[in-house]
Image (tube, rainbow, N blue to C red):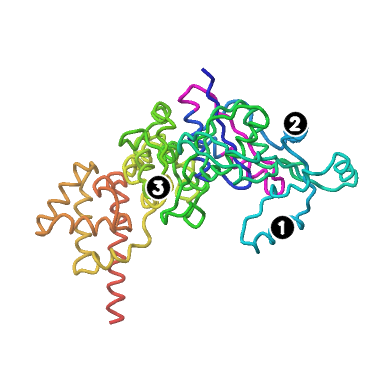
Amino acid sequence: MTEVRTRFAPSPTGYLHVGGARTAIFNWLYARHAGGKFFLRIEDTDAARSGDDMVRAILEGMQWLGLEWDDDVIYQSQRLEKYRQTAQDLIEAGSAYKCFCSKEDLQQRREAAAVEKRDYRYREDRTCLKLSAKDILAREQAGQPYVVRLRIPDSGETTFVDQVYGEIAVRHSQLDDFVILRPDGYPTYHLAVVVDDHDMGITHIIRGDDHLSNTPKHVLLYEALQRTPPAFAHVPLILGPDKHRLSKRHGATAVGEYEKQGYLNRAMVNFLSLLGWSPGDDREILTTDELIQTFKLSGINKKSAVFDETKLEWMNGQYIMKLETQALVEMVTPWLVEAGLVTVDFLKENQTWVAAIMKLLQPRLKKLSDVVPAAAYFFRAPTEYDDKGIRKYWQKPGASQQLQALSDRFSSVNDFATVQLEPIIRTFAEEKGVGAGKIIHPLRLALTGTTFSPGIFEVMEILGKQNVLHRIESAVGYIEKHRLANKEVA
């Protein structure tokens, strides 16, 4: 059997888009499933729009996703002579020809056709195909610029079988003699992609279905070069929540942005794999090995998938939950340090304490960046308190006295652990004749400055006795100060 060889071939005119990343993932999974090879090719023939920073972003994005490629990266800009020679070979074989028609001339023809309410195709007259060898030589010697066009057969149709959409047939009358080489000697996408895919031995081309209309042209090029086309699989595009093509207006679309927001690479691969593909069952969380084992082209859907960021967050949270605590600590360290909550030295000196915090917060984190607001009160005592919490829990009569009474009871506890603290609070609530929540909520606000946190008993144990007593004291002072201020205003 022929070795499966796939490729991902982005243009470095932008960052690695999630749609491109999904295409790369499908190619990578298919090659790995078949025990074949996966290649990376940078299509940088558009010198005006391509940039080194974009190339770097693509490579970094691929590396972050874990999509390792076989062999060296191929750059089209280093293969220009190959494309030019191929165009010349096609001219000599009679499959292509030089066209000297100016842009202005072609525009006039298009406008004339528009007046007649019809589409213009150059093949209607093929002016330059009628030029003699002597005329062509004279124009070249005069320095007249030209393009090279592929000559489309006058009749018949081109057919190919797409692995997603089935058999597709396009009549040659619907196609034009398209340009394969520009006046500057640079190839068009059509020529470069066909030459490269053949030279690389690509057996399967998996790409977005926006390229579906290009495929008949590519098949014709393969035939003109007397080469066998690879198998094609065109994948429906990714849509935003509004069912329009995913773009920047829907939020972040570059893979690098999701990395910066704190998404895990394996979660992103898992999520993108399921956009337009199904393993054939209801599984949503699949390891990379499971994705490789189950990936088949037959699982690709014809219907466009919707990029649901809420689901991505949920899935990312599932992956965070599976992390070893120490691995989570290492991953969130950059966020904690950048936020100024800790230093690297502090983390090293307090590893056990920080690990306890992360273990408690782990079920609540959807993204690694969530750790900053979620963990801030562990590292810094609150100086401000949630406004709604103040109105709901601290403006009632006796709020400060209740907190002070709790503090008095906590001060006598030697083993400041959950098993000791929970009975104290619940007994206190029973004595007051209220539910435990009436005691816990005002206390949580005092200790964290917020109205939401993990279990308050676990939070207290991690904070430790001295921190708890100090924070309650600060909260009592805050309540009294603002109660007096309100009285003075009144």
Q: In screen coordinates, is 231 left or right of 310?
A: right
Tell me if residue 484 comes above or below residue 279 in the rendering: below
* Quadrant of residue 394 within the rendered picture: bottom left
Q: In screen coordinates, is 478 left or right of 143?
A: left
Q: In screen coordinates, is 294 left or right of 338?
A: left
Q: Earlier in the sequence, mark 2 or mark 1?
A: 2
Residue drawn at 39 percent across, 49 percent down: 308
Question: Three-letter amino acid code at disc 2?
Answer: Ala
Q: Which residue is mark 1?
A: 109
Is the C terminus in the top left, top right, bottom left or bottom right quadrant?
bottom left
Question: Three-letter amino acid code at disc 3?
Answer: Val
Front position among marks 2 and 3? 2
Q: Using a 10 Å C-alpha cutoff, classify the residue at mark 2 as few (fewer than 14 neighbours), some (14 to 19) or many (20 or more).
A: few
Query: What range of the chain is rendered magenta?
Result: 31-60
Q: Earlier in the sequence, mark 2 or mark 3?
A: 2
Mark identifier at residue 371? 3
Q: Which residue occupies the foreground of this view, 52 or 337?
A: 52
Mark 2 touches mark 1? (CB < 8 Å): no
Distance between the alpha carbons at the discs numbered 2 and 1: 29 Å
Q: Secondary structure at mark 2?
A: loop
